[in-house]
Amino acid sequence: MIPVNEPLLNGREKELLAECVDTGWISSDGPFVRMFERNFSHYIGTKHGVAVCNGTAALETALFAAGVGKGDEVIMPAFTIVSCLVATLRLGAVPVLVDVKPATWGMDVEQISSRLTARTKAILPVHMYGHPVDMDPVLALARDYGLIVVEDAAEVHGAEYKGRKCGSLGHVSAWSFYANKIITTGEGGMVLTSDEGVAEKARSYRNLCFRGDRRFYHTEFGYNFRMSNLQAALGVAQLERVQEFVAIKRRLGHLYRAGLASIPGVRFQVEETWAKCVYWMYCIEIDTKLGFTADDARTALADRGIGTRPFFLGLHEQPAARDIGLFLGERYPVTERIARQGLYLPSGLTLTEAQVETVTTELRDVVSQLSAKRSVPSSGSV
Ligand SMILES: Cc1ncc(COP(=O)(O)O)c(C=O)c1O
């Protein structure tokens, strides 16, 4: 089986974890937490880092710290992980959707202005699958309308927009270090910002809003979203190799691109001229004209020992959202199409060039067999 993902943990991870055990610093009070916050914020180019327990908590903490609260509207792409929705709803805020671009599968920024209202508080661009969102128009709108920009940078460690790192472009950004991310702490996340006030609110929120002046006295509610020293030790070791990891992702991305180019009806993620994509996942979209879905391809690839994952289902199609009356009657055609026609191929840092070649060869074969069968009518995809 060629797995869809595998972390690369052969740097100083064991050494730094052993240090935690030897010194007894295993909770969030340890020195690696501060070190990881400092090193990661420095790498991305922000003044402050606030480590938390996962990327979903990072989103909620970032939104809270940036001032999003009850009744505020947050504009986000329909095509994203449910974490964006959950984080918004937990703060009593209201999610407002736009569709995504067909080339990069990232937020269609041209649709944002039509969704603005007097209650709009924030824009939540999600840099998708390693590729940046076109941020200049987002930042211009934010300036013009006094909005906050919260970047979801969970999938773009090291990616750049016009020479600047994703996650340093808005007011605040949210990161994930889940095991499939470019650098990992197993589970983990971080909030980055250059605004001291936002950083202070984020530190407070992740730690139950304890007050410095009076212990166990609370004037606000927060959560225990703390990252442990053990997780941060992994993060410090991983970050030492981030440039090497990004280079691996890009090299494999270019190999996949070359290999997939000759498969008719299979499209790889486009790298825009203003972008440095880090190809977090090697994603493809299958043309509906071929007459089969991503699920059909995933089943056939699994039979050949190739691990894959489906794309996100649009937020507006999530039963849990519809059950509470959200997004009723709303349609986002690009999101709906790619949710059915998109998948990601083996994408781990341990992937070899030979494995990329095997995946491409098997995919070519699967595409030719399935399109010969035409398992679904070409009009039935959306
Ligand atoms: C775009 C995006 N945002 C947020 C998250 C949430 O991160 P976590 O799984 O660490 O909660 C993910 C997770 O994969 C993600 O892909």
Image (spheres, rainbow, N blue to C red):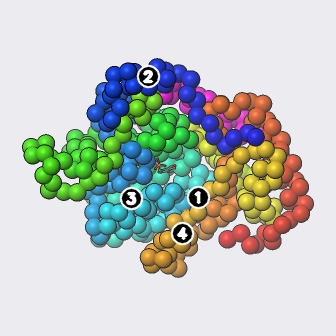
Which quadrant of the rendered structure holds the C terminus?
Answer: bottom right
Report which residue position mark 3 lands on. 87
The alpha-carbon separation of the residues under discs 3 and 4 comes to: 15 Å
Does residue 246 show up magenta in the picture?
A: yes
- The mark that comes first in sequence, 3 or 1, is 3
Residue at position x 44%, y 58% in the image: 84
In front of the other: 211 or 172: 211
Between the C-alphas of marks 2 and 1, the distance is: 37 Å
Nearer the observer, 187 or 133? 187
**Label 2: which secondary element:** helix
24 to 301, vertically: above or below = above
Under 8 Å from ligand 1: the CB of mark 4?
no
Q: Which mark is residue 318?
A: 4
Disc number for residue 18? 2
Residue 325 on image: x %, y %: 45, 78
Q: Main secondary structure of the magenta part?
A: helix
Q: Secondary structure at mark 4?
A: loop
Q: CA distance from mark 4 to mark 1?
A: 10 Å
Q: Residue at x 13, y 45 (%)?
A: 215
* Residue 379, percent from left and from top: 76, 72
Ligand 1 lies under 8 Å from the Cβ of mark 1: no
- Element type where label 1 sits in the image: loop
Q: Residues within 10 Å of mark 1 (few under 14, many from 20)?
A: some
Answer with left or right where residue 247 lies relative to residue 230. right
Q: Which residues are magenta?
A: 238-260
Is 289 on the left-hand or right-hand side of 206? Answer: right
